Image (spheres, rainbow, N blue to C red):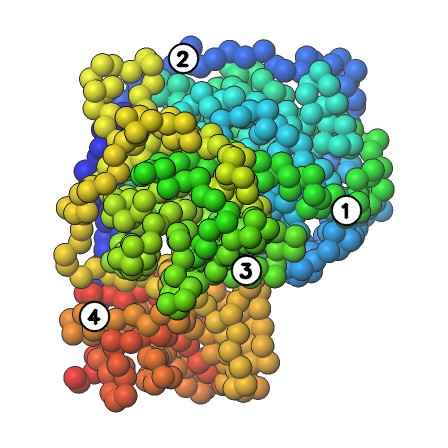
Amino acid sequence: MTIISVKTERKSTTLTMKGSYLSLAVLLGLGGCGEAQQAAPTNTVTPQAATVETSAKNTIDLWPALTPAIAKDAELEAKITALVSKMTVEQKVAQMIQPEIRDITVEDMRKYGFGSYLNGGGAYPNNDKHATPADWIALAESLYQASIDDSVDGINIPTMWGTDAVHGHNNVIGATLFPHNIGLGAANNPKLIEQIAAITAKEVMVTGIDWVFAPTVAVVRDDRWGRSYEGYSEDPAIVRDYSFAIVEGLQGAVSGDFLSDQRVLSTVKHFLGDGGTEKGIDQGDNIATEKMLVDVHAQGYVGGLNAGAQSVMASFNSWHGEKNHGNKYLLTDVLKDRMGFDGFVVGDWNGHGQIPGCSNESCAQAANAGLDIFMVPTAAWKPLFENTVAQVNSGEISQARLDDAVSRILRVKLRAGLFEKPSPAKRPLSGKTELIGQASHREVARQAVRESLVLLKNNQNVLPLSPKLSVLVAGDAADNIGKQSGGWTITWQGTDNKNADFPGATSIYSGIEQVVSQAGGQAMLSVNGEFTEQQKPDVAIVVFGEEPYAEGNGDIDNLEYQRGDKRDLALLKQLKAQGIPVVSVFISGRPMWVNAEFNASDAFVAAWLPGSEGQGIADVLFTDADGKVKHDFGGKLSFSWPATPQQTTVNVPLATESAEVKAQYQPLIPFGYGLTYQSKVSDAVVLDNLSEDNLAAEQTLVDLPLFERAVKSPWSMYIANSAERQGLSSSVAQNSALTIRTMDRVVQEDARLVSFNGSEQGVVGLISNFPRDFRAYSNSDSALTLSIKTTASLQKPLWLGMACEGDCRKQVDIAQQVNGKLGEWQNISVSLACFASEPMDFGKITMPFYLATSDKVDVSFSDVVIHTQPGESTVQCKK
Ligand code: BGC
Ligand code: BGC
């Protein structure tokens, strides 16, 4: 394991894929030795990475032998045995199947009696983003009642509902949203963390839900990873202590009110090594030695299991090329046998389907490796159920393994008192809507915001500020609660939300405004930093940073902030040039290379992703009206800050590491750093005149992904009919011409399915109000490419188009090409020259892609990219 800055280039997938960009087998084959794969495709056989030196693996003695937090209870075990002995194979397998609310009905539950179910990120009852707690409870109640109804399946074991309440009950409108884990790590306060978890449990229980998929205990090694912010720290010790605290906060202490009616089940995730994949690629390959796996990545499980965690989620990633979901050594030998875990292992979102030889619909390997519950969203649950039953009947999965899995699930249900608890609607906290976003909960979140802030720069003690000043508040994160909350916020990606979606929350600006106006000062919100001569402020607070993202959509090539688009830097400079002191508040899911932004700021605060309580920022930036500090900064970096964009794996060395490794640790700002109002100038790392050269900056034109896994910044997806255009605010949307829904092609939500109904022309496309300059692409024979699939032959045109500012546009009919291959995914590639006729202005593209038709047809599409070197099948046009 290297701790030094790694200079390897990470090529974007599109680059690697050049020419034959859908030939995944070729792509993966190209990967070579130890090369991590970008999310192995479902249903495709993934070649194993190079053989591993066996000496590096499978040394069980390296692992901690833990004593189970809960001693075996003979009476409870007898109950389990009695129950299991009465169950049929079908009833047992149903306990192992966890479908998703968008893909089952109450009648499915009655018929099958699933052991559990989930709602994915951004999935709500009735597909309604604004579902009320009563709607959540109604769904929980009806599924629960169907589960204990034995009239069809002959069994009455209560089901349970799992959800991703990962920074508060984040799928529910109005819930308290805590800072994401990276910010909590900077606070380094396990007591506070426990309180946060206890509050989260309460808000979850108001909606009738039993179980939370948290904490994430990834120990993040490469900050390019899109899930960096879900990790508390790069330091395993913080993660271990926090894991204990969170699990205890969610479930209650083993010696206290464990799984009482105020508590929920917790899942420690993702086992194992999710934070250590090569190049920070989500769902990629971790090639750490077994010793590092134990010393770094396993520590969160030590904390979590010691606190009595009842479930562990298997990770999407591989270890030395072998997918964890199918790794018996890790799931069974290490976790269950050596570490004494007697709860159940739940899979991740169709993660079993990524094991070579498996599909979402069939995977005996995972069960045999030790997976107890298949998380199987999409319609795959039914064939998976049937195939698993068949595999038990044929002996491919042994009866003993089946019984072990079911016993583990029942053990947890019995410990949680599920058999005696009233139904979801009748539980003590159900429907107590006053608890959702309650003031006392928000107070704790606000405290967490204060404690998570890390002061990195404070020249001439610009901070703290007097609230009597005239303060300009600028930047596009200043009054944007969605942006300050990051991913996993109402929607999965945290995008497509408005301030109105956060009743009871405060933006950072509104927090500042309150403090300043009360003290007789003046606060002006001006996103672009402009003001009139009479309004010249005493100081500017600029709030800017990363757009929200979740999981692999947040993976990046290097850590440079706003590469190729220094909009925020320009804003800082514009203010500074007018002699206004500039305080930067940086919103981000990871440390980033912001040398230029440091240089242009007088003070700089890393605020991470603070969540719903924006006032916590003003609490610390401002004194009271008498000039007394109300709250000092306490946050300390739990991630080292990089000195270059390429220094992506700069991690504080472990005590046990060699002197050489320790000497190589040279971040820009070290782990544990954070100024306070007491700090002396001599304590501070100087963040002036830093090098602004991104030495490895790309000089050549590279492929430009527009929609690849996720919609890329600055674009957003819209739908339109003849009357109006609308942005999308959840995973399903419709207008009078079409319905659009997200679908999983290779990884989650990487494609869209559009059902055009034929009543009028419908349009789906990408749009931005910041026009972008595509001239370099149009001058270089690049092409607009996408993957597309239709099920029926088109009788009318299917337009592929682009538009520029002022609504100029140009479209070409691709119906003929598409009709060539019905029912299959195919690539369509159209040279930009085909969009070139007047009045197209490639200098000001506002819609780089749309599809339109008035036919009645289902169209799925993914991977919309401007390719610099399109393949031979590209449709060419004369210039
Ligand atoms: C994520 C998990 C999450 C699960 C269920 C997956 O995509 O990796 O962290 O718990 O979805 O929503
Ligand atoms: C999405 C999934 C994602 C999940 C995480 C869902 O809403 O459809 O693709 O993995 O959220 O919970």
Provide the residue designation for mark 3: 497
Q: Residue at x 31, y 39 (%)?
A: 459
- Amino acid at the residue labelled 1: Glu
* Helix, strand or loop at mark 1: helix
- Amino acid at the residue labelled 3: Asn
Label 3 vs label 1, nearer the camera = 1
Provide the residue designation for mark 1: 434
**Residue 40 in view:** no
The outermost residue toward the front is 626
The answer to the question of whether label 3 and label 4 lie on touching residues, with beta carbons closer than 8 A, is: no
Q: Residue at x 78, y 32 (%)?
A: 261
Looking at the image, residue 36 sits to the left or right of residue 711; the answer is left
Residue 101: horizontal and vertical position, in percent?
65, 52
Q: Estimate the spatial distance between the alpha carbons at disc 3 and disc 1, rounded to whole Å.
A: 23 Å
Image quadrant for the N terminus? top left
Q: Badge 2: how crowded within 10 Å, few (<14), some, or many (20+)?
A: some
- First-in-chain label (3 vs 4): 3
- First-in-chain label (2 vs 1): 2
Provide the residue designation for mark 4: 777
Residue 62: horizontal and vertical position, in percent?
40, 12
Q: Estimate the spatial distance between the alpha carbons at disc 2 and disc 4, rounded to whole Å.
A: 54 Å
Q: Badge 3: how crowded within 10 Å, few (<14), some, or many (20+)?
A: some
- First-in-chain label (2 vs 3): 2
- Amino acid at the residue labelled 2: Leu
Provide the residue designation for mark 2: 62
Q: Estimate the spatial distance between the alpha carbons at disc 4 and disc 1, rounded to whole Å.
A: 54 Å
